[in-house]
């Protein structure tokens, strides 16, 4: 069990080193991630506006075609109006003319509405595209900065990642899962005793538990913060290596 506790403490040391490497990059990783999300959202919005515009263009063109069809019909009906032989035929032609004229009026209004909506959508699309271009440029600049910083720390980062992999293959899956869960919640998963207290939260550890903890025969969990606590002696020995 002492070997298990030692491995957990070593893993935390390596992860702390990796955290320091990551912190040396400042807020660049988070900035890049935020910009990537924003650029992706803007790209989708631009695409949505473009699809909407295409739909409006198709609807406008259809309305224009229908207007032309009804105008052709109106010419035909008006020509036929002079050739009717009785009131019944005249009334029928008149109804067709009225319907065609009303349809042309309705379709013309629709045509104008499609034009206005399309014009507004084009303006919105242009504004979105401008913002997308600006944010895309900033993203590329930040990516370049991050790549430069990452290049400076690449060798160190690779070394720690290699050390981490060597430790993980020696660990029990359940213990590793417990470690990862605590680390995810608390940042640091394993901490040493300091002045008979958990150095993670400062909560005092009862004397009896200090004695049990120094035996290194089981994984001790801080009752206050839930971190894994190791004896100061084990920590000193590991740090001295």
Image (cartoon, rainbow, N blue to C red):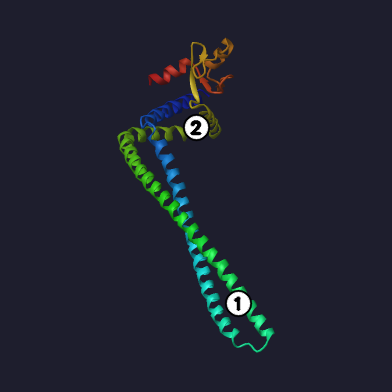
Q: Would you say 196 lies left or right of 135 here?
A: right
Task: Report if the CB atoms under discs 2 and 1 are less than 8 Å apart.
Answer: no
Q: Would you say 139 lies left or right of 7 here?
A: left
Task: Identify the residue at horizontal 60%, vertical 88% (top origin).
Answer: 83
Task: Identify the residue at horizontal 65%, vertical 77% (top origin).
Answer: 95
The image shows residue 214 at horizontal and vertical percentages of 52, 15
**Of 126 and 196, the residue lying toward us:** 126
> What residue is shown with label 1?
97
The image shows residue 65 at horizontal and vertical percentages of 51, 72
Q: Eyeballing the image, is 185 above or below 233?
A: below
Task: Identify the residue at horizontal 40%, vertical 39% (top origin).
Answer: 32
Helix, strand or loop under label 2:
loop
Q: Which mark is residue 177?
A: none
Which corner quadrant of the image does residue 104 belong to? bottom right
Which corner quadrant of the image does residue 145 belong to? top left
Whether residue 31 is visible here, answered yes or no, is: yes
Q: Eyeballing the image, is 43 above or below 61?
A: above
Mark 1 Cα-neighbour bin, 10 Å: few <14, some 14–19, many ≥20: many
Mark 2 Cα-neighbour bin, 10 Å: few <14, some 14–19, many ≥20: some
> What residue is shown with label 2?
171
Q: Eyeballing the image, is 41 above or below 165?
A: below
Task: Identify the residue at horizontal 51%, vertical 26% (top origin).
Answer: 186
Labels 2, 1: front one: 1
């Amino acid at each position: 069990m002492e070997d298990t506790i030692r491995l957990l403490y070593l893993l935390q040391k390596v992860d702390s080193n990796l955290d320091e490497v990551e912190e040396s990059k400042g807020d660049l990783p988070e900035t890049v991630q935020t910009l990537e999300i924003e650029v992706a959202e803007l790209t989708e919005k631009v695409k949505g506006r473009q699809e909407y515009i295409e739909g409006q263009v198709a609807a406008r063109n259809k309305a224009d075609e229908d207007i032309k069809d009804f105008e052709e019909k109106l010419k035909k009906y008006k020509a036929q109006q002079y050739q009717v032989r009785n009131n019944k035929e005249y009334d029928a032609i008149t109804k067709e003319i009225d319907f065609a004229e009303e349809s042309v009026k309705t379709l013309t209004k629709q045509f104008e509405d499609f034009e206005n909506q399309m014009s507004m959508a084009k303006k919105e699309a242009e504004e979105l595209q401008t913002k997308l271009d600006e944010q895309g440029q900033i993203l590329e600049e930040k990516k370049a900065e991050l790549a430069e910083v990452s290049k400076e720390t690449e060798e160190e980062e690779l070394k720690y990642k290699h050390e981490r992999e060597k430790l993980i293959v020696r660990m029990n899956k359940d213990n590793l899962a417990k470690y990862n869960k605590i680390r995810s919640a608390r940042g640091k998963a394993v901490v040493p005793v300091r002045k008979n207290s958990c150095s993670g939260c400062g909560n005092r550890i009862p004397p009896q538990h200090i004695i049990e903890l120094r035996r290194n025969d089981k994984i001790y969990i801080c009752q206050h913060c839930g971190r894994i606590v190791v004896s100061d002696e084990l920590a000193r020995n590991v740090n001295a290596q």
